[in-house]
Structures are given as C-alpha cells and as structure tokens.
Amino acid sequence: MIWSQELEDVGKVAFAYLLALPVGWYREKEAHSVGVRTMPIVAVASCAFILLVGGWGRASMDAQSRVLQGIAAGIGFVGGGAILKSENRVHGTATAATIWNIAAMGAAVALEHYLVAVFLALLNFVTLFLLLRVKQSIDQDEKDPPASPAKRGPDG
C-alpha cells in the first residue's frame, strides 16, 4: 500500500463530494426528494469506482472502459427510476440528468480532469438555478393557453 497515493485518492473523493454539495443543496431547497444526500453519494461512488480500478495510468484501457460503461449504465438505471409519468406529464427528467451529470463529475475527479469536473458541477447548478424560471414560465404558458380572439359579430 502506498500511503501517499491512498491519501491523494481520499482527497479526490472529498473533492467530488464538495463539488456535488451545491447541486444537492439546491435540489433539496427546491423540495426535490433527490438532493443533498443523494448527489454527494453518487459523486463519491462514481469517483471511487474509477479509483478502485486504478485510475488512468494504473489500469488497462479495457478495465477503465468497462468501469465507465458500468457507471453510465448503472446511473442511467437509477436515473430512470426517478422519471415518473402521471396523466399527460413526465416528471423527474431533470433529476435523472442531474444524477448522471454528478456521476460523470465524480469520474472526472477520479481521472484528474479537475477543470471538467468543476465545469460539470457549475453547469449543473447554473442550469437548475437559472433555467428554473424559464421552465416555470413555459409550464405556466402550457396551463394558460393564449385566449382565442373574440368572435366577430355580423358587423365584422
């Protein structure tokens, strides 16, 4: 066991956790069931799976590829469970996409793509935060369709 490598890996897991916290906090604040606990756990698990296979340079490309495929498929399955259809609406797609993004962010940390990891976390947070009002506006427009023009009388 190489303690310096182990400590570096623990630091990576902690960094993935910290990057996922703002997204999880925001999801929780907006009263979503997948939030402050789930997002950091997804990030650290994804990071850990990559680290366990050895990270870049310490494992074969085949092994790395299989782990990344497993993460993508597994998280896709988990995210799919967050998507619900009720009446004519589909809910949970942003949650599913967020879970997938957070997993990719955790993997990026493990693979030492720190700028990519920070950018993914930032984009996720900003998208959820800034585009919420746009989504609410679109949803409101769908609920309240524009009034049809008044029918004209016989005088035109």
Image: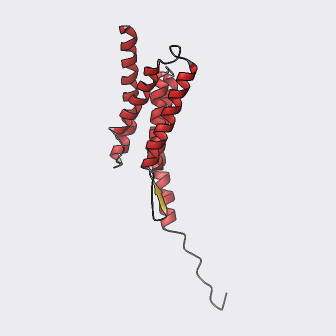
Residue 95 vs 72, above or below: the answer is below
- Spot the residue most to the right: 156
Say whether residue 127 is visible. Answer: no
> Image point 58% across, 81% down: which residue?
150
Side of 119 where 82 appears, left or right: left
Q: Quadrant of the C terminus?
A: bottom right
- Viewer-proximal residue, 69 or 56? 69
- Residue at 45% in and 49% down: 132
**Residue 125 picture location, percent across and down:** 44, 38
In-front residue for pair 68/102:
68
User: Is residue 41 depicted above or below 35 in this figure?
Assistant: above
Image quarter of the N terminus: top left
Residue 18 at x, y percent in the picture = 37, 28
Q: Is residue 27 left or right of residue 117?
A: left
Q: Residue at x 53, y 69 (%)?
A: 145
Foreground pick, 132 / 20: 20
Q: Position of residue 77 (x, y in %)?
A: 47, 43
Residue 10 visible in the current orientation: yes
139 versus 1 height, above or below: below
From the viewer's perspective, tell me whether residue 64 is left or right of residue 31. Answer: right
Counting every numbered tag in the picture gives 0
Residue 52: % across, % down? 43, 21
Quadrant of the rendered image containing residue 44: top left
**Colour scheme used in the picture?**
secondary structure
Q: Nearer the viewer, residue 56 or 27?
A: 56
